[in-house]
Amino acid sequence: MSKFTDPRVLRRFVVLMCIATVVMFTVWAGVRMYQEEAKNPGDFETRQGDILLSDGEYEKAIERFNAALAAQPGHRGAWGGRTTALIAQERYEEAEADLTGLIAYLEKTLQPDDPTGRGALSAAYANRGIIKDRQARYEEALKDYIASAKTDRDIAEGPGWINRLLYHDRKPSSVIDRAQYLYEQLQLPEEKRLLRVPERDAEQRIYKP
C-alpha cells in the first residue's frame, strides 16, 4: 500500500503544509511591512501612536509620534497625532505652538491636488481654534474656525452619520456650528453675549485626520 494513502501520513502532510503556509505568510507580511516602512518612513510608528492615542496612553503615543518624526521630519500624521495627544492632556501652550508649526509647514508644502494634506491643514486650524476657544480667546478662535472651513469644508462640518450613530444620533458640534454661534454672539453687546455653554461645548471633538 502506498504511504500516501496511509491516514497518518496524510494527516502529518496536511499539518506540515499548514505550518509551512503560516510561516510563509508571516515572512511575506514581514517583508511587505519592511518594504512599506522603507518607502514611507514613520508610518509604522505613527500607527503605533494612533493605537496608544485611542487607548488614552498619551505620553507613550507622543513618544511614538516623535519617533515617526525622527524617521521622517514633517510626517503629517505623526505631527497631527502629537498635537492631539497634547490637547488631550490640556497642555495647550505646547499644543498651540505645535499646531502653529504644523500649519506653517503645510501651507508651505501643500500641493493643490493633495486632499489629504488639505484635510490635515483644516484639522490643524480647527484644533488650534478649539484651544483658543477653551481659553476664552473667542475672536482668535473664530478666525481659525473660518480658516478651517475655507480649507476643507468636509472637515469643518464635522463627523458624519457613523459618528452620530455612535453618539446616539446626537451630532457632535462642528467647527462651522461653533463658528456661526461665536459670530452671532460677538455681534451682540458684550453684556448680552453667551459665549460658553458647557454642556454643548463638551460635545466638540478634537480632529485627527
Image (spheres, rainbow, N blue to C red):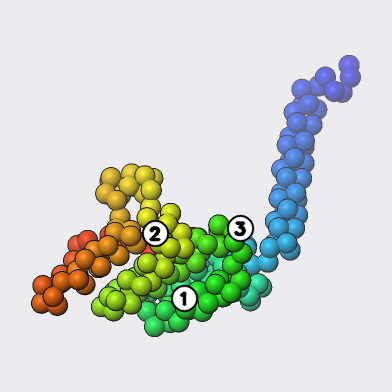
Q: Nearer the viewer, residue 58 or 145?
A: 145
Q: Nearer the viewer, residue 120 or 169?
A: 120
Side of 3 where 39 appears, left or right: left
Q: Which residue is mark 3?
A: 113
Q: Amino acid at mark 1?
A: Leu
Q: Which percent across, then down, holds residue 203?
A: 28, 60
Quarter of the image where the N terminus is located: top right
Pointers 1 and 3 in contact (C-beta within 8 Å): no
Q: Amino acid at mark 2?
A: Ala
Q: Which residue is mark 2?
A: 156
- Residue at position x 33%, y 44% in the image: 165
Pointers 2 and 1 in contact (C-beta within 8 Å): no
- Residue at position x 37%, y 67% in the image: 146
Question: Separation of disc 3 and disc 2 at Cα?
Answer: 19 Å
The disc, 1 or 3, on the residue closer to the chain's N-terminal end is 1
The disc, 3 or 2, on the residue closer to the chain's N-terminal end is 3
Side of 118 where 15 appears, left or right: right
Q: Residue furthest top?
A: 1
- Residue at position x 68%, y 63% in the image: 40
2 or 1: mark nearer the eye: 2
Q: Which residue is mark 1?
A: 99
